[in-house]
Image (cartoon, grey):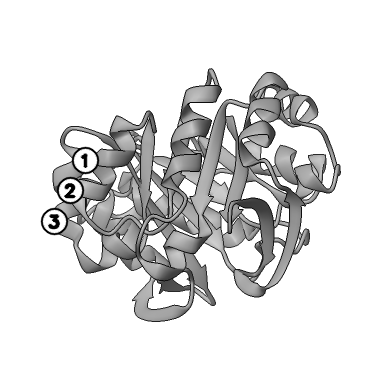
Amino acid sequence: MELFCAVDILSGRCVRLLQGDYNAKTTYNDDPVGVAVRMAEEGADWIHVVDLDGARSGHSENAKIVSEIAAAVNIPVQAGGGIRSQATAEAWFAAGVERVVLGTAALQAPEMVKALADSHRIAVALDARDNEIATDGWLQESGRTVLEVAKRFTDTGVDALIVTDITRDGMLQGPNFKGLSEVIDAASHDKGASPLALGAAHNSIDIIASGGVSSIDDLQALASLRGGFQQQNKLSGVIVGKALYEKCFSVAEAVAILKHPE
């Protein structure tokens, strides 16, 4: 299981929000590039970058910093925020981003997402509040459920689904294990297959957890999490932000437990 260290950028600074609330932010560093480099040096598997300004406005506003991070670290960068067009996504790939995250675009332009996934590594963000997907920087309700959207993108060539429980994000109160297990099952099921017929099925898409991680115990539980029907299927990664900034544990400690949870 891989560790994705979060670098959220707002007004050029490295910040964390509480439950996605732009009015409830904590600024941790004025140098997001330096933060990313330090996390990479400490052993992170990926850097997960979010352009918070872009997510809210619909336009990439911190693309320069994202490209600087991609150039500065020796591990892959996964990035999103305000990417609403194929041209913008292509520009991020050209800047060195390994995997682009699409949230709002996944609901508004699913065919574009599928087209990009044919030639690039794409992740779909399932950002949910009370099981309903939120868009536009988590400011708008979509009327779509997490499992509905997860099933829609499972067999489209998309690389990964990132599952975020907004109510837990930045709260250090533990992940939504039940919701994550349900997504694992939803992404594993063959169309039309019954739960009893799924023993030989296999996850064809990565599931990445996000939101609420507060301790090494949370990481160990995530590394051991399986779907209810698909006991052999599990999470492929976890995004951690505030717990690292608040020094609940180190990057090295997190990587060690995720690689060897038993």
**Three-letter residue code for mark 2:** Lys
| Mark 3 nearby-residue class (10 Å; few <14, some 14–19, many ≥20) | few
**CB atoms at circles 2 and 1 under 8 Å apart?**
yes
Q: Residues within 10 Å of mark 2 (few under 14, many from 20)?
A: some
The residue that mark 3 highlights is 111
* CA distance separating discs 2 and 1: 5 Å
Quadrant for residue 159, please give it. top left
Q: Which element is circle 3 on?
A: helix
SS state under label 2: helix
Q: Position of residue 130 (x, y in %)?
A: 54, 77
Q: Position of residue 101 (x, y in %)?
A: 38, 48
Question: Which residue bears the numbered disc 2?
Answer: 114
Q: Are marks 3 and 2 in contact (CB under 8 Å)?
A: yes
Q: Do the residues labelled 3 and 1 touch (CB within 8 Å)?
A: no
Is 136 situated above or below 70?
A: below
Alpha-carbon distance for marks 3 and 2?
5 Å
Q: Where is residue 8 in the image (x, y as percent from the top left)?
A: 59, 51
In which quadrant is the C terminus drawn? top right
Inspect the image, locate mark 3, and give the three-letter code of the amino acid beneath it: Glu
Q: Which mark is residue 117?
A: 1
Disc 1 element: helix
Q: In this view, does 261 lie to the left or right of 189?
A: right
* Residue depicted at 39% across the width and 33% down the height: 97
Instruction: Using the image as rendered, state which of residue 67 and residue 151 is in the foreground.
Output: 67
